[in-house]
Amino acid sequence: MNEDIVMRLLKQVKSGEVSIEDARSALDGVNLTEEEYITAVDHGVFNAPKPGTIVRSSISPSATSWLVTIVFAWGLFWTIYWAGGLSYGLFNYWDQQILSFFLAMMLTTLIIMGIVYLKWVMPDTLIVKHRRNKFIPAKDPESWKKYEV
């Protein structure tokens, strides 16, 4: 995720690369109205999001790496190899032990590809969901729901 100039400047002040006076002089021409400041502070912090709102979604930067591409090419080749061997063995009445080995190797290759996809390709998404209490006491008629059939 790209960081903005202000965050980079704050990190440099924290590490000691830039002095506080230099940071103040760099931010001297920045003007914010009070409404913009309040909306920036309140946005997503104090306001409860609506149910089902996606709070954060970012594509993993390593999804474009060559290593992920090589793993998927490797997995596709071996999956086709093991599936082809399994289907050839089924038509030629091979022993069940070798057929089960081919099936296990094909599934293992697919699982490895799935793990790589979930870890390094799939976007990191957080969906906010609100739920009701699972226990409703007997003396709480306001929370009761009336269902009609």
Image (spheres, rainbow, N blue to C red):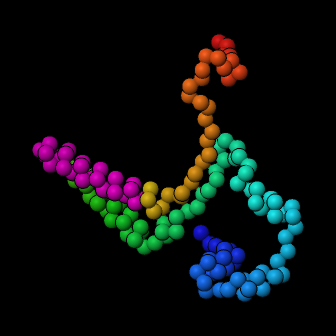
Q: Position of residue 110 (x, y in %)?
A: 34, 54
Considering depth in this image, is 125 or 28 the residue closer to the camera? 28
Residue 72 shown left or right of residue 14 in the figure = left
The answer to whether residue 102 of the structure is visible from this angle is yes
Give residue 144's quadrant in the image.
Answer: top right
For residue 18, which quarter of the picture?
A: bottom right
Q: Is residue 88 visible?
A: no
Q: Which residue is depicted at the point 77% across and 61% down?
A: 40
Q: Residue furthest top?
A: 149
**Quarter that holds the N terminus:** bottom right
Query: Within the magenta stretch, is there residue 97?
Result: yes
Bounds of the magenta segment: 88-117
Residue nearest the observer in this picture, 126 or 12: 12
Q: Residue at 60% of width from left, 23% of height from top? A: 136
Residue shown at the point (38%, 63%) measured from the top left: 72
Report the side of 117 relative to 26 (left or right). left
Q: Is residue 85 magenta?
A: no
Q: Main secondary structure of the magenta part?
A: helix
